[in-house]
Image: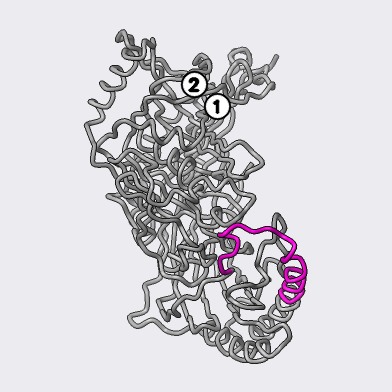
């Protein structure tokens, strides 16, 4: 099982207000070149000169240092869990031996040669001599691993049958880029946030349905320094803040019921105020209480309406992962879209772009924004589907036969090797109606198919998809809030235990109309290169056919006793039984 959205939390609206003391350091009027960048460049020039003369020769050398400052404050059920702040630096070295056409990263059949490890921690002091010593040692380690991998690849390559894409070059030639941006940092007083997470989680204790609650504030300032032997020199930084709300309950049959909500912001002044947070908590608690008591939905196939948040995750799972470039190249992948460029894969009124240059969509922050990807390629807007026709893939520096260059989607979690990943996946439609009209169309479909009800998918936790050839080419999306919508006009009925399932090529053709309001879903997506921040945006969609199955359920029953604060027998006896 792969490509799971990890810790995906739903964003309903962008809310602003006063915040506890959090101050972002103002950028320098003229950005100063960090001593870190200078040390990387000096050691790269020295090492590459020597390594390209070795046997086998290194043809590419890249260095990245990621400097991360982070603050976290977490509370649960009215008490503080932790409050920490720290800073670290991580060095990653990429040594490629061989040539752009065939190098140590080449995958032969199902085998991928091991690299030299995830990198290493380096001092946070700007001491060029100490930093260069750490780079020197890591470079030697990575060259040894790279040279051994290339020897094994050349030995085994000739006895393997390869596809056309498998014969594409292993690494793309890209133009070098130079950018020196301001270094970023923040100063946060954690004490007010400690009081807030206590208060926010304590408020959930009023509900008998809430078994557990966790609220976490996090702030992160990350500065990246990249150099490579092609001439790229980059220095850039980014600050993000997040407030995550989570509550958990249990239905009588043991099914876990979870509700999520999160706020994301970049400027300290845009942090949510207490009024906004408590309003979100009221909604979460009401929904959880309703779901705990709701009936389980039986497996069905029929018309469904997905709100914008739900539709965004649907496109991320069903389309987005299968459009990532490296999946077209790997013979072990299902390669759903590999030979469909220029073909109609969606209704003609739908287009899809991935625009990682976009910081916001309307009032919403987009987590998938970045200036340069993790291979030093600038972020850019890429049209993936134009009026239903597949046009492009999300590309890293692992080229395809007809797509020889990266379009800025080489991404990774620290310590992982970059591969092509989604950033800001945005669905656009030219066949829009109001959401009220979309609901009316849903009822028309229910009646036309002689169904008694259809489904309204209002919120989703995340999902996952199978893309390998040895598995069914299927996806599974995990709704949190689902309603039955009845054809006879009865009030909507909240149900639980619903998972959306299907296969991509069939599911994408069933969309018949969209709403007129785009909604954003921010989260963290996990795949081969680790967990990366992503956004997906879509209007509500109406589909003529959606299959749902019963959700996996725990066999653990709810607690035998109520929470102490809600035990009426204890309360009447003053705590004595």
Q: Say which quadrant the C terminus sits in.
A: top right
Contact flag, marks 1 and 2 (Cβ < 8 Å): yes
Left or right, 562 with reference to 321: right
Colour treatment of the image: one colour
Q: Between residue 569 and residue 279, name the one nearer to us.
A: 279
Q: Between residue 132 and residue 17, name the one nearer to us.
A: 132
Give the answer, above or below, for where 381 lies relative to 197.
Answer: below
Q: Between residue 212 and residue 497, name the one nearer to us.
A: 497
Residue, x 77% and y 70% (percent of image)? 155
The magenta segment = 146-169
Quadrant location of residue 380? bottom left
What is the CA distance from the residue labelled 1 to the residue labelled 2? Answer: 7 Å
Can residue 80 be seen from the camera position used here? no
Residue, x 39% and y 18% (percent of image)? 454
Q: Main secondary structure of the magenta part?
A: helix
**Neighbourhood count class around disc 1 (C-alpha, 10 Å): few under 14, some 14–19, many 20 upward:** many
Is label 2 in a helix, a strand or a loop?
helix
Residue, x 48% and y 50% (percent of image)? 339
**Residue 67 painted magenta:** no
Q: Between residue 271 and residue 460, name the one nearer to us.
A: 460
Residue 461 x, y percent position in the rendering: 50, 36
Image mark for residue 291: 2
Residue 433 x, y percent position in the rendering: 22, 32
Image mark for residue 167: none
Can residue 203 be seen from the camera position used here? yes
Residue, x 44% and y 33% (percent of image)? 507
Residue that mark 1 sits on = 257
């Amino acid at each position: 099982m792969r490509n799971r959205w990890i810790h995906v939390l739903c964003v309903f609206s962008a809310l602003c207000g006063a915040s506890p003391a959090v101050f972002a350091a103002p950028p320098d009027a003229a950005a100063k070149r960090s001593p870190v960048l200078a040390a990387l460049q000096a050691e790269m020039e020295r090492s590459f000169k020597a390594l390209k003369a070795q046997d086998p020769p290194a043809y590419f050398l890249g260095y990245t240092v990621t400097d991360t400052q982070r603050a976290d404050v977490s509370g649960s059920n009215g008490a503080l869990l932790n409050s920490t702040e720290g800073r670290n630096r991580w060095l990653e070295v990429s040594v490629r031996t061989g040539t752009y056409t065939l190098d140590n990263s080449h995958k032969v059949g199902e085998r991928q040669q091991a690299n030299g490890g995830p990198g290493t921690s380096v001092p946070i002091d700007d001491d060029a001599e100490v930093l260069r010593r750490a780079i020197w040692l890591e470079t030697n380690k990575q060259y040894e691993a790279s040279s051994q991998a290339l020897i094994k690849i050349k030995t085994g390559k000739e006895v393997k049958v390869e596809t056309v894409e498998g014969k594409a070059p292993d690494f793309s030639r890209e133009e070098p880029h130079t950018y020196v941006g301001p270094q970023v940092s923040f100063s946060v007083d954690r004490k007010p946030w400690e009081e807030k997470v206590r208060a926010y989680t304590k408020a959930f204790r009023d509900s008998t349905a809430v078994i557990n609650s966790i609220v976490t504030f996090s702030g992160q300032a990350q500065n990246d320094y990249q150099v490579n032997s092609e001439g790229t020199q980059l220095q850039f930084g980014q600050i993000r803040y997040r407030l995550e709300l989570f509550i958990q309950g249990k239905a009588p049959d043991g099914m876990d019921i979870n509700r999520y909500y999160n706020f994301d912001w970049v400027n300290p002044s845009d942090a949510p105020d207490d009024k906004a947070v408590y309003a979100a908590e009221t909604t979460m608690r009401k929904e959880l209480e309703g779901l705990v008591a709701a009936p389980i939905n039986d497996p069905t196939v029929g018309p469904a309406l997905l709100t914008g948040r739900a539709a965004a995750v649907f496109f991320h799972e069903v389309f987005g992962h299968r459009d990532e470039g490296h999946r077209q190249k790997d013979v072990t992948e299902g390669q759903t879209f590999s030979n469909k460029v220029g073909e109609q894969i969606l209704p003609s009124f739908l287009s899809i772009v991935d625009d990682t240059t976009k910081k916001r969509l309307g009032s919403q922050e987009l987590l998938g924004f970045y200036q340069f990807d993790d291979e030093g390629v600038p972020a850019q807007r890429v049209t993936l589907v134009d009026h239903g026709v597949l046009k492009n893939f999300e590309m890293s520096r692992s080229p395809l036969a007809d797509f020889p260059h990266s379009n800025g989607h080489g991404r990774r979690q620290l310590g992982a090797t970059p591969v092509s990943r989604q950033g800001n996946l945005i669905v656009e439609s030219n066949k829009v109606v109001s959401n009220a009209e979309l609901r009316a169309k849903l009822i028309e479909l229910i009646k036309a198919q002689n169904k008694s009800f259809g489904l309204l998918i209002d919120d989703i936790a995340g999902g996952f998809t199978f893309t390998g050839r040895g598995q069914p080419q299927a996806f599974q999306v995990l709704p949190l809030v689902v309603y039955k919508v009845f054809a006879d006009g009865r009030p909507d009925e909240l149900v639980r235990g619903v998972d959306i399932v299907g296969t991509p090529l069939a599911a994408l053709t069933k969309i018949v109309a969209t709403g007129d309001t785009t909604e954003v879903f921010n989260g963290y997506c996990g795949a081969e290169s680790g967990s990366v921040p992503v956004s997906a945006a879509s209007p509500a969609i109406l589909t003529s056919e959606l299959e749902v199955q019963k959700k996996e359920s725990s066999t653990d029953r709810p607690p035998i006793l109520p929470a102490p604060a809600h035990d009426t027998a204890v309360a009447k006896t003053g705590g004595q039984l």
